[in-house]
Image: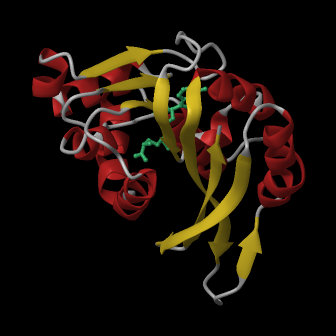
Amino acid sequence: MVNLKDRFGAFINGQHRCPTGFVGRLVADKMVRQHQPEHGWAISELALQPTDEVLEIGFGGGRAIELMVEQVTQGHIYGIDLSPTMVRSAGRRNAQAVYEGRVILQQGNVSALPFADQQFDKILSIHSLYFWSDIPQAMQDLCRILKPGGKLFLVLATTWINADGEKIVDPLQATLEEQIIPGMLEHGFSIAYLAHGPDNRQFNNVAVVGVR
Ligand SMILES: C[S@@+](CC[C@H](N)C(=O)[O-])C[C@H]1O[C@@H](n2cnc3c(N)ncnc32)[C@H](O)[C@@H]1O
């Protein structure tokens, strides 16, 4: 029998994978507040230029897009997210830039990216990679849509610090180091590595970094 706690946990996990409806909007607002260090880290590491063409995958409430709009004043910021609720939420947050055509948001899946070869200078994603069904395939496709010299920066947490201060490393960390990053070098990236980022709450953040 599934107990209430497990059911609630599954519901919240579902709300992070694809936030929907009223609860989805609350989850988006919570993520905007909670993920500030990760948003700041990713954006500073991308060294955005005014003319950059940028893509964010899994933008949630759209706070990172709102910050990037201040720097990308002549290029465009595209966003794709599985959840129609997040497309509406991020659209409201960035209404002026959407109206001006500087931000283009759409519902979609990283497994079917509707973008041209070599379209982007920078691609980022924050706390979304856990939910992707085929990470190696996504890396290949992300390389396809990056310009030569373009940069990929995918933030995620792989380590949890428990109440005793012990670090519990998720097996995903080894998968990234042993399979995903070597695979990126075979599939078109000239540089690929795992960067260590800021801790936030009880999590250690890392980023999968690639340069085409
Ligand atoms: C935990 S939220 C993070 C949101 C935001 N990046 C932030 O840091 O606040 C994960 C986001 O990834 C999106 N997502 C999950 N799977 C996806 C997929 N396969 N393709 C595109 N977006 C996806 C979800 O809809 C959700 O908005």
> In the picture provided, is 175 more to the left or to the right than 119?
right
Image height of 151 relative to 197, above or below: above
**In this rendering, does residue 124 appear at all?**
yes
Q: Quadrant of residue 22?
A: top left
Residue most toward the right? 178
What percent of the width, then of the height, locates residue 151?
55, 42
Residue most toward the bottom? 164
Q: Quadrant of the C terminus?
A: top right
- Could you say which is closer to the camera, residue 121 or residue 201? 121
> In the picture provided, is 29 more to the left or to the right than 132?
left
Q: How is the image coloured?
A: secondary structure
Q: Quadrant of residue 97?
A: top left
- Could you say which is closer to the camera, residue 109 or residue 2? 109
Residue beneath the point at 23% across and 44% down = 71
What percent of the width, then of the height, locates residue 26?
30, 41
Residue beneath the point at 60% across and 84% down = 163
Residue beneath the point at 40% across and 31% down = 54
Q: Quadrant of residue 195?
A: bottom right
Counting every numbered tag in the picture gives: 0
Residue beneath the point at 42% across and 61% down = 41
What percent of the width, then of the height, locates residue 169?
76, 69
**In this rendering, does residue 57 appear at all?**
no
> In the picture provided, is 207 more to the left or to the right than 75?
right
Q: Quadrant of the N terminus?
A: top right
- Could you say which is closer to the camera, residue 43 or residue 28? 43
Image height of 190 relative to 38, above or below: above
> In the picture provided, is 93 more to the left or to the right than 83?
left
Image height of 181 relative to 121, above or below: below
What percent of the width, then of the height, locates residue 2?
73, 42
